[in-house]
């Protein structure tokens, strides 16, 4: 199957692509990093589409999707996503894969709609305390770059709203794989230590979880070490299929 189209979710159009082998397992839903279009999943797309169905989309204000005056925080994002999945007739259950800011969104989605989610994979996911505790540990130049990036979709204020929206949520017993890039040049030693602490906290969100540190990868693990990400997704798909 292969579909790419714009869908009116009521007030704005969102672009999605639905590809992969048809089977009885869950659809894998991808949430990109901040400001990243669905094309950023290309390094893993071909291999994953051989064993699962993939749903990728551009958030409002990104890529080929439209824009509106609606807020760009995570609560609105996951309602947009859920509406899009319904309009596109992509039924649950889902495995949610979130990179960076996308990790906040999939956590919030799973906490609000746990019956729809069979598993979660977090790729160097953002954490609710990063702006308060990690960013001050960057060099001044990196702080300026980091804080200046929020002009593509969500503003800095909306991004920080998203961090607060996910605070206190848990994933209970939803299977979870947390993957962390071990080589990140923008970090100081202190900020990287804080990031690793955050990643360990993310692992503790579920009672069925594991943490994989991908030593040779940076923040974009699926670009730097695509095969490791493909293997993790395949592992989760197979484990879910074996329980059914």
Image: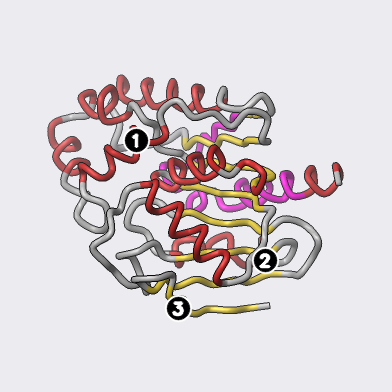
Residue 223's x, y, as percent? 48, 54
According to the picture, the residue beneath numbered tag 3 turns out to be 6
Q: Position of residue 225 (x, y in %)?
A: 54, 48
Q: Are marks 3 and 2 in contact (CB under 8 Å)?
A: no
Of labels 1 and 3, earlier in sequence is 3
Tell me if 20 is positioned left or right of 239 in this view. Answer: left
Q: Are marks 1 and 3 in contact (CB under 8 Å)?
A: no
- Mark in the foreground, 3 or 2: 3
Q: Which residue in the protein does label 1 denote?
A: 163
Q: Residue at x 50, y 35 (%)?
A: 180
Q: Which residues are magenta?
A: 211-237
The answer for how far apart the CA atoms under marks 3 and 2 are is 21 Å
Please give the label number shown on residue 49: 2
Circle 1 sits in a helix, a strand or a loop, which is it?
helix
Circle nearer the N terminus (1, 2): 2
Residue at the spot 27% in from the left edge and 57% down from the top edge: 153
Above or below: residue 195 compared with residue 12: above
Task: Report the number of discs.
Answer: 3
Q: Secondary structure at mark 3?
A: strand
The front one of 66 and 4 is 66
Give the image location of residue 132, x and y in percent: 25, 25
Q: How far apart, in angstroms, are the residues tagged by discs 1 and 2?
A: 31 Å
Instruction: Tell me how far mark 1 sits from mark 3, CA to CA.
Output: 28 Å
């Amino acid at each position: 199957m292969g579909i790419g189209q714009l869908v009116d979710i009521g007030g704005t159009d969102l672009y999605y692509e639905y590809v992969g082998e048809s089977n009885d397992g869950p659809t894998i839903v991808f949430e990109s990093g901040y400001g990243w279009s669905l094309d950023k999943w290309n390094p893993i797309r071909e291999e994953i589409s051989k064993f699962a169905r993939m749903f990728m989309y551009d958030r409002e204000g990104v890529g080929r999707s439209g824009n509106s005056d609606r807020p760009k925080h995570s609560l609105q994002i996951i309602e947009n996503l859920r509406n899009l999945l319904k309009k596109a007739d992509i039924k649950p259950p889902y495995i949610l894969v979130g990179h960076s800011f996308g990790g906040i969104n999939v956590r919030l989605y799973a906490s609000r709609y746990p019956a729809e989610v069979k598993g979660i994979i977090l790729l160097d996911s953002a954490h609710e305390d990063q702006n308060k505790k990690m960013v001050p540990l960057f060099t001044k130049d990196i702080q300026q770059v980091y804080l200046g990036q929020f002009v593509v979709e969500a503003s800095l204020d909306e991004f920080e709203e998203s961090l607060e929206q996910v605070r206190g949520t848990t994933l209970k017993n939803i299977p979870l794989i947390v993957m962390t890039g071990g080589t990140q040049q923008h970090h100081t030693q202190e900020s990287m230590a804080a990031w690793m602490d955050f990643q360990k906290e993310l692992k503790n969100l579920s009672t069925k979880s594991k943490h994989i540190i991908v030593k040779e990868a940076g923040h974009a693990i699926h670009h730097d070490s695509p095969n490791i990400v493909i293997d993790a997704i395949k592992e989760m798909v197979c484990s879910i299929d074996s329980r059914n």
